[in-house]
Image (cartoon, grey):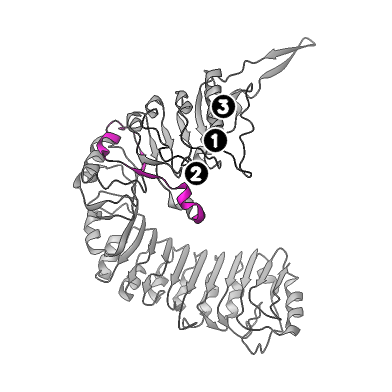
Amino acid sequence: MASIIWSLLLFLAQLHTPCFTSASQAHAGNLTRLSVPILCRPDQAHALLQLKKSFSFGKSTPTLPSWRDGTDCCFWEGVGCDASSGNITVLDLNNHGLSSYDLHPAIFNLTSLRRLDLSMNYFGLNCNNIPSTGFERFALLTHLNLSNLGIQGPLPIGIGKLVNLLSLDISTSFDNLIHFEETYDHHSNHLYESNFDTLVANLSSLRELYLDNVDLSRSGEELYISLATSVPHLEVLSLAYCRLEGPVHKSLSRLHSLMVINLQGNDIAGSLGSLQQLLLGFGSLGELGSIFTWLGDRKNLTSLVLEGCDFSMTTPSSVVSSFKTLRTLTMYDCNLPRSVVSAIGNLMDLRTLEIMEFCTTYGSILSSFGNLTNMIKMQIHSPGSVPMPTAIGNLTNLQTMVIQCDDPGGYTSGTIPYTIGQLDNLRLLDLNGCYSGRIPSSIANLTQLTGLHLSNNAFNGLIDGGDLPFCSSSCASTSGLRGRHRFRVLSAMKMQWDYAIKHENLGQFDRAMSTLKGVKFSLETSFLGGVGVSITG
């Protein structure tokens, strides 16, 4: 999201620059050539070219071809200029695949910069790759992003002198790296700050602070006092995996503008003021009881992410009273007793519920979930069974349902209830490794589906009056495909059989699927001697 906003801002900045270096004007039948002076200042163009020389480019890496001597640098890739002065105000090289031994000092000659984004590159070829001074020359800077840059060492003291800074990001963003696990160490920052007060003392304008994975273990309670004193208008605070321990000092509750806080991966407790979004993580299963007090006023809390939380000592009534304003609830690796799961069904404002990454649950979907009539997305990943109650049919606003079971007992979640056909707004239905028996014919009522994934289940028989055959080892019946037109809107369907499909049935299946335009079917197991079949309509 941050990178999208930066790109938009860069685009807007370039809209304010002249679009032509020359123009033609017709007057009284004569064609007059008008020259428009090049905007870019030569000294700043020279600084950019020096910076380019410090980069290494791989075979698949763009080489910044627009950065050429003698051309207007205001039109170079990633560069934005002030329309009146020609000063460079924006430099955005986010995720350009750049490598460097260090941050070249030439960049500090761009003293008119207001926005600088070098994130998702690698400047870690040299162990001492982040200069301690130089940043203080960016006196006009409002946004600085050095996240996922592979830099290490102490935070540069010059950053603490940027009095106009609104957003500071020197984090290792795990969200950005989740799809690039092989390059995690390559991009992660390894930074520390021994004197937090010095860092933020002059940053009174700051609204967003992202220091995820920066070692702040030496800061102690000074960190919270400094935040409350020096950055009173802070709205977003992200300190995930910063090695923080002990209580959160009460002074942090003075940050009345704070809307989002991320303290995942720390061992903390304490008290906060009103929040809209909260992300908490525990190194091992931690009790939530004390956290209710720690949260303080929760009337504005609408989004909550919990990781490694133990609900075993939590009363159902406290769940309802503490989380009643939530619209989004996400839990990873949590211990969820049946009573707590049932209480979640009373959080009437929930739009999104995610129970992920092997949360220990006892009956993941209970009849009380039928109360969640405002639910739009439900995603459950369970190490055991996930029985589906008939009350699931009450969730008529549901658009996404993803249920994945890693059940050692094998398909003990039972059958899919007929009431699933009442979810007439459903776009994605993904049921993996959970259910057995017949699929109810009511599934044909889900006319809004664009994705249907039914892998690793033990379905059998034919959908009565329905559209698709599901076979057991006997594959007793795969004929009589009816009502195929009902699934015309499907753009993707994925099914998987763990048993053989008789050869004589494949031709009929092929003919049936040929009526579905733009639909790709994938049968993902070994059958017919290990030959897979993919049918595209």
The stretch in magenta equals 181-210
In the visual, does 440 lie left or right of 239? Answer: right
Depth check, front residue: 248 or 392: 248
Pointers 2 and 1 in contact (C-beta within 8 Å):
no
Instruction: Pick the residue in front: 409 or 120.
Output: 120
Pointer 2 residue:
120
Q: Which mark is residue 223?
A: none
> What residue sits right under mark 1 in the picture?
55
437 or 58, which lies in front? 58
Left or right of 443, for residue 478: right
Q: Residue at x 61, y 18 (%)?
A: 38
SS state under label 1: loop
Q: Mark 2, mark 1: which one is toward the viewer?
A: 1
Q: Can residue 218 be seen in this snapshot?
A: yes
What x and y, as percent, mark residue 208?
A: 37, 40
For label 1, the crowd category at 10 Å Cα-Cα, with few meaning under 14, some 14 to 19 and many 20 or more, is some
Which x, y percent locates residue 272? Answer: 24, 50
Magenta segment: does it hold 206? yes
User: What is the CA distance from the residue labelled 3 to the residue labelled 1?
Assistant: 10 Å
Residue at position x 57%, y 84% in the image:
438
> What amino acid is at disc 2?
Met
| Marks 2 and 3 close (CB-CB < 8 Å) | no
Q: Indicate the position of residue 98 as horizontal and vertical percent values.
A: 54, 40
The amino acid pointed to by label 1 is Phe
Please check the rendered image and state whether residue 240 is part of the magenta-colored stretch, yes or no.
no
In this view, 496 is above or below 64: below
Q: Which residue is denoted by mark 3 in the rendering?
A: 49
Q: Residue at x 46, y 73 (%)?
A: 392
Query: Residue 536 falls in which quadrant of the image?
Result: bottom right
